[in-house]
Image: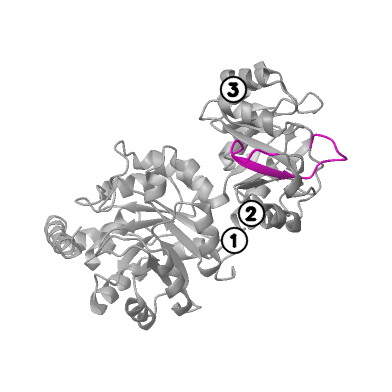
Amino acid sequence: MALDALVAHKHEIVRRRRAETPEALLAARAEPTPRRLRTALAASGPRFVFECKRASPSAGILRPRYNPVALARALAPFADALSVLTEERFFGGTLADLAAVRAAVDLPLLRKDVIVDAYEVLEARVHGADAVLLMLSVLDDATYEACRTVARRYGMDVLTEVHDANELERARRLGADLVGVNNRNLRTLRVDLATVGRLAPLVPRSALLVAESGYARRSEILAAAPAVDAFLVGGSVMQAADPARAAAALVHGPVKVCGLTREEDASHARARGASHGGLNFVPSSPRCLEPEAAHALARSAPLSWVAVVADLPETEVLALARRLPLAAVQLHGHEDAGYQERLRARLPETVALWRAVDAEGDPGEVDLDAGAVDLVLLDRRGGGGLGGSGRPFDAGHVARWRTRFPRFGLAGGIGPDNAAAAAVLGPAIVDVNSRVETRPGLKDPARLDALFTALRHAPGKRTPAP
């Protein structure tokens, strides 16, 4: 994408549209917005603006079967606002996409485009936008002020985008109260996530800071969140096979709700953002399932399903893997390294092997085949038994294990009150069970809701909520 060519093209588009629909006619259709993007992003915890876009200059076509309404509805449960691309030549968007999304969801909407004229701000409002992106790499001060004046007339917010210290100084001088730092260099299209870190200290404390471009992993969110207020994410979610799941992974991180026994609990966990569901096959557990019931449960919600077993013969574990749509098998008994090695060799490549260990034990003495096991799940055993104790995890224990096994999951008494503390320790997955139940096997929707709210707030944010 040649930015200069795009800007010249946009000037021609505006000239044509203004001739077709004079500004006075457009203004007659515009009304003030009742929604505020800035208010949504000022709420506690890191906030998220997810984009709906068909293509990008850096990656080409992102979603060949682009349905902005379906995407908006899927992303809405995890978004604080949505950004809709309306630039046609390079991003494949239209103003009709914006209007369609406005009719489908009630979140604040940002018109994402290379805006070059105040006429486009009026266009944005008429088509349902509550905010517009203004790029200081494109606009001079006079045009920026003209665009912001129209935005203010209709109660719209302005996300002022900068790429370097010079543009940020201009934003300060212009009094921008919502600043977007784009990690992507629009001249080279290269992404450098360190850009936000370099510029964040220069952003006035009175302004909210939005980090834009390049975020694809929860670890990147955790690293940047304390320095910013919100994230604007597009490409990584648009390219995902399941955009809603990709969005949830950024907002909450991977979460396994274990010991599921009811379809309604599985569906609720999935809707709130769970990535994995646990199917218990340990006979001594009150959550133990028969294979037929597990199969029906696995069909009820599109989770990544994990079979939890303890000292089960290898042939029976393999039979479960053949019958069920498993993403992983979790060993929770006394399975030694030889068992792990043999099982790994016979499991399908698509089924991971997890090993639960007692976090209070010695990492140097665990009987574990690191070449066979994909993830070590740190739990606290109850009185030497096979199940978890429900006692909270200990950060000191986690530190000892993490040194030897960097890819670890975290279980053990995780609930709404300590989920954030668990998440910031950097586990590959957070595993919850008894602390979100009313009784064994019956999940409490309110406790699940509280858990995911807590996980969302885990990294903190730059500006305290008002």
Work out whether mark 1 precedes mark 2 in sequence or the reverse, and give the earlier one: 2
Q: Give the CA distance from mark 1 to mark 3.
A: 36 Å
Q: Amino acid at mark 2?
A: Ala
Residue at (54% x, 52% y) in the render: 251
The reply to whether the magenta stretch includes residue 442 is no
The tag on residue 321 is: 3
Q: Give the CA distance from mark 3 to mark 2.
A: 29 Å
Q: Is residue 18 above or below residue 78?
A: below
Residue at (47% x, 65% y) in the render: 38
Q: Residue furthest bottom?
A: 173
Residue 279 in view in this figure: no
Residue 74 vs residue 406, the one in the foreground? 406
Work out whether mark 1 precedes mark 3 in sequence or the reverse, and give the earlier one: 3
Q: Amino acid at mark 1?
A: Pro
Q: CB of mark 1 within 8 Å of CB of mark 2?
A: yes
Residue position marked by numbered label 1 in the rendering: 459
Relative horizontal placement of residue 135, taking residue 10 as reference (left or right): right
Other-residue count near label 3 (Cα within 10 Å), few / some / many at <14 / 14–19 / ≥20? some
Provide the residue span drawn in magenta: 368-387
